[in-house]
Amino acid sequence: MVARGQRMLDVLSELGKGTRFEIWLPATRDLHQQVIEETRAAPLGNGETVMIVDDEQALVALSEELLAELGYEPIGFDSSVAALQALQGQPQRFDIILSDEAMPDLTGTDLAREIRKLRPDIPIVLMSGYGGAQLAARAASCGVSEVLRKPLQNRELAEALARARELIREPS
């Protein structure tokens, strides 16, 4: 196979010995480097403490790493009940809430409703792989500042958190 004057695939075959394929892929930038570059161009936090709530521990860890790179102090929970208990114990500890919607025990919107009883002023950003008008309406009725669609893009998350930071600064 030839593409734009360059071979993309070589096939070498000998009867009784087998076949060997050589695939020539174009060079690409390292994905990690691309993530770092996107993060550098994104709006940065100023040490605000962000509560991350997602029932998937791997996503909590990934979010914590990303938010730390963006200049936030992330504290992750893989249980919505544990997150609510932490907020009940120290309601002023957190500046922003970043929560998944689909979780056992308390959904993200249920969690937001409970958080509003403790901290009516705290910005809440909801994440969901399932969007639509129903979720947007339910989230708005619970006082959610913004709904992001999963999978999240780094810049999209950074911009949503920057908007949430502006809500922190607005007088109540």
Image: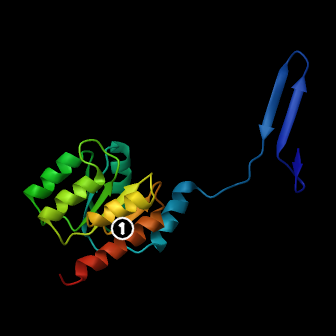
Find the residue positioned furthest to the bottom.
171
Disc 1 marks a residue whose amino acid type is Glu
Can residue 102 be seen here? The reply is yes
Residue ID at (37%, 67%): 70
Q: Residue furthest left?
A: 89
Q: Depth check: give the residue in front, 22 or 154.
A: 154
Give me the residue at 20% from left, 51% from top: 83
Frontmost residue, 78 versus 120: 120
Q: In the rendered view, would you say 59 is above or below 149?
A: above
Q: Residue at x 24, y 59 (%)?
A: 112
For mark 1, give the secondary structure. strand
Q: Residue furthest top?
A: 16
Which quarter of the rendered picture does the C terminus lie within?
bottom left
Q: Is residue 77 above or below residue 47?
A: above
Q: Position of residue 40 (x, y in %)?
A: 46, 71
Q: Which residue is mark 1?
A: 146
Disc 1 crowd rating (10 Å Cα; few below 14, some 14-19, many 20+) is: some
| 98 or 70: nearer the viewer | 98
User: Residue 27 vs residue 117: left or right?
Assistant: right
Is 7 on the left or on the right of 93, as rendered?
right
Report the quarter where the N terminus lies: top right
Left or right, 51 with respect to 128, comes to left
Residue 107 percent across, percent down from the top left: 28, 49
- The total number of labels drawn is 1
Q: Residue at x 24, y 47 (%)?
A: 106
* Residue 134, x across and y down, in percent: 40, 58
Colour treatment of the image: rainbow
Q: Is residue 99 above or below residue 15?
A: below
One can see residue 93 in this view: no
Q: Position of residue 23 (x, y in %)?
A: 77, 41
